[in-house]
Amino acid sequence: MPSPKCFVSLVKPPAKRKPFVNAFNHRIDLLLPTDVYDIISQSLLSCPSLAAPPVYHRLVMPLGEILEPTFFNTHIKSGNILLLSRGRLDVENIICLSDGVLRMNLDTETYERAGLQGQPAKCGNGSGAMKRRRFVVELNLRSPSYLTGSKSFNRLKRACENVLNQPQVFLFADLSPSKLSSSGSGSSAADSAAAIPEIITKFPVRTPVPVVETFTDVRIPAFRAPTNSRPHGGGKSEEANYNRGIWRDWVMEIHEYLSLLLLPSGPADRLRATTSVDPYLSTYAVDDELESPSTVTKLQLVGLIPAKWAEAFWENMERLLESLTEEKPETVWAAMVIHGFDDVPFEPTGKQRAGLDACGNAYSILKLPGEGGAMTWEIVGGGNE
């Protein structure tokens, strides 16, 4: 199996960014200089395009509930939802649904009893036909072959009634927020509530609660690429190769810096200006450090966060920073790390995941000071290449 790799890209708006493709995200960490956060904090989560923080439910139900007429027609056929079951990949049966496609990673016994068409999993199986332990099933429920009463629909319904009939814990999010906004007043709220399946109304609405932390006396790099370094181009000469290598080293140092800033216990001691660590214990140092330490604020959101909401959140923050960048372009920067759920059986592209790749994907994006654009990091496990 190939070793994991880190893919880095430097883009400038309005280019598409890689971090906003992962359907099942569970955490967002946003880092900003505290003086910048204080200015934009009131507008950061109140932009009309965000339509408030994303809402989701934690449902306990058998899979067959999604085939009930109200659920199936409202949320799958004509709507768009996210659904993810809880469990450990390669150990338990995992089910997920996004963009109308139902995907299941099943053990051999469940797969054979269910009678659904699938294929051996690419991961989690030994060599040879007699050693198959896992199978995957992928069903496009928006296909015309899955109309209510059709053969394909009835086959799935029988599998849900006879085999996949045990209640499971699912995370559920409707990507059309108006269908779940029944907390308002008037007839529109009543009509919206009438369209919500009964199983959803039994469980409370959950919303990621912003958690804000402030870190003082933090060493801050200038986020400037070394002189003459370049991300690509320049030919094949020895000097060009050297300049590209210098840029790659700098990029990974910045990624390491952001990782140390986001440790669960707070920034690493080597990032604290007031903490002295013996170089014998740690040789890490912040390169190209600003003259004086600063204060950094972290905003954290935890829950089921759709990719579109994460993208709108980042774009709103960029818009708010535009006016500040004109006043003090060298000190305005922002970083966001998006953490995917663990044990999701498929990549956004449909590729299977398992084994060491059961750890959720993490994407990082950094808005460089001034007109430097934005840098993104994507770490891909060996089995996903």
Image (tube, grey):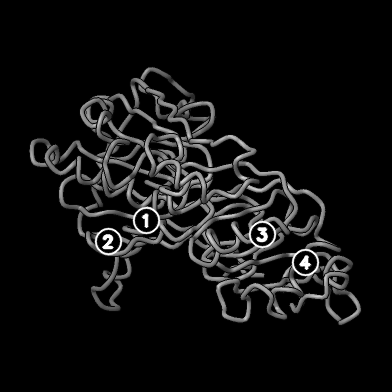
On screen, residue 96 versus residue 336, left or right, reads: right
Q: CA distance from mark 2 to mark 4?
A: 37 Å
Residue 124 disc label = 4
* Residue that appears at 27% across and 70% down: 240
Label 1 with label 4: CB-CB less than 8 Å: no
- First in residue order: circle 2 vs circle 4: 2
In the picture, which quadrant includes the N terminus?
Answer: bottom right
Label 2 with label 1: CB-CB less than 8 Å: yes
Q: Looking at the picture, which amino acid does disc 2 mark?
A: Val
Q: Nearer the viewer, mark 3 or mark 1?
A: 3
Q: Nearer the viewer, residue 188 or 252?
A: 188
Residue 296 in the image: state x and y as whole percent.
Answer: 33, 28
Q: CA distance from mark 3 to mark 4?
A: 33 Å
Image height check: is 246 above or below 189?
A: below
In the orientation shown, which residue stands out farthest toward the top? 274
Residue 376 disc label = 1
Label 3 with label 1: CB-CB less than 8 Å: no
Q: Looking at the picture, which amino acid does disc 1 mark?
A: Thr
Residue 11 disc label = 2
Q: Nearer the viewer, residue 179 or 264?
A: 179
Q: Quadrant of residue 203?
A: top right
Residue 50 in the image: state x and y as whole percent.
Answer: 33, 45
Q: CA distance from mark 2 to mark 1?
A: 8 Å
- First in residue order: circle 3 vs circle 4: 3
Residue 229 disc label = none
Using the rendered image of the protein, determine whether residue 195 is visible from the camera's viewpoint: yes
On screen, residue 43 versus residue 162, left or right, reads: left
Q: Looking at the picture, which amino acid does disc 3 mark?
A: Glu
Classify mark 2: helix, strand or loop.
strand
Image height check: is 58 above or below 93?
A: above
Q: CA distance from mark 3 to mark 2?
A: 45 Å
Classify mark 4: helix, strand or loop.
loop
